[in-house]
Amino acid sequence: MATTLTAQRIKTVGVIGAGQMGSGIAQVMSHYGECQVILQDIQQQQLDKAQAGIEGSLSKFVSKEILSEADKQNTLGRLQFATDMASLKEADIVVEAVVENEDLKKNLFRQLDELLKPEAILASNTSSISITRLAAATRRPGKVIGMHFMNPVPLMKLVEIIRGAQTSDETYAIVNDLGKRLQKTTVVSLDYPGFISNRILMPMINEAIFALFEGVGSVEDIDTVMKLGMNHPMGPLQLADFIGLDTCLSILNVLYDGFKDPKYRPCPLLVQKVNAGYLGKKAGKGFYTY
Ligand code: CAA
């Protein structure tokens, strides 16, 4: 019988995808979790960018005296960067943070299922793809779970844990403890479209876009209402730019298709922005120009 894991025994963590989310997850797993972390991406250039980003983020914490120089060096020392998937072989848990493409994620999970030891956990940082469907692509559905971090990962205090239909109590307990070890507050959501976070966030963002589309208010006024009137750190249109308008559209489509309820229909203005390539901050233009 396979040995079982506990959160304390999670020593080696694999993270797949060295974008903003993946690099943030790798950083906190090494920093707070004190785990050996292998960040894997097929593009060396992306890994170099992630390494520089993590160093920059840790340096900010050092300059604010949140972290000592020695802690920064230890955090960096526990991080490895790799282009080949085989480097993840010894991982106790792998968190995938690749683009939101279900076939790509299923394919990755199939490969990881072959590669990893039987007791290893497969986690996805997906913001909307069904954990139950990803789990069904593996022979270890009980060990598949959602670990949804928020951007920017080193600053945001939440991890939303998603239990698929077959996620075991043991897997949930281990991942919940790991989230706490990362000094995050954890919440648990069942595996329904948008989970908790995006089921609430995306309709708000979509409604803000409809308000703009219908001429109720300007970009600045809509955001100012939510920032100063509701104490949100960012207005919904700025937040949409920050998340990526393509990502917002794709999550809204998951909600719309999943619930078959017109209240989730994406605003035509959002669709048009995405078609035009105005994807938000990363593209230099969305509702704002950067
Ligand atoms: N590491 C270290 N420091 C960082 C950092 C990082 N990764 N990112 C930002 N900082 C620092 C900034 O450099 C800045 O430092 P200084 O004060 O020294 O300049 C400090 O944190 C504060 O940042 P800013 O001054 O730029 O702005 P801010 O005070 O507004 O804080 C913010 C930034 C924390 C992002 C805040 O605006 C915020 O909370 N915004 C909302 C974020 C949010 O809602 N995220 C969730 C998105 S949804 C999601 O992720 C999931 C999904 O499925 C879509």
Image: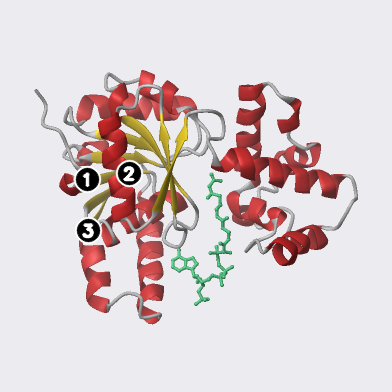
| For marks 2 and 1 on the same chain, the one whose residue lies earlier in the sequence | 1
Estimate the spatial distance between the alpha carbons at disc 2 and disc 3, rounded to whole Å: 16 Å
Q: Residue at x 73, y 35 (%)?
A: 266
Q: Quadrant of the N terminus?
A: top left
**To which residue does mark 3 refer?**
34
Spot the residue most to the right.
Answer: 215
Residue at image location 30% in from the left, 41% down from the top: 175
Alpha carbons under labels 2 and 1: distance apart: 8 Å
The image quadrant of residue 2 is: top left
* Mark 3 or mark 1: whose residue is earlier in sequence: 1
Query: As drawn, is 266 to the left or to the right of 15?
Result: right
Look at the numbered disc 1 and give the secondary structure of its residue.
helix
Cβ of mark 2 under 8 Å from ligand 1: the answer is no
Q: At which x and y percent is residue 82?
A: 27, 47
User: Residue at label 1?
Assistant: 7
Give the mark toward the camera: 2 or 3: 2
Instruction: Report the amino acid beneath label 3.
Output: Glu
Q: How is the image coloured?
A: secondary structure
Side of 273 where 165 appears, left or right: left
Circle 1 crowding by C-alpha within 10 Å: few under 14, some 14–19, many from 20 = some
Residue 262 visible in rendering? yes
Q: Which residue: 56% across, 35% down? A: 194
What whole-number distance in Å separates the C-alpha atoms at marks 3 and 1?
12 Å
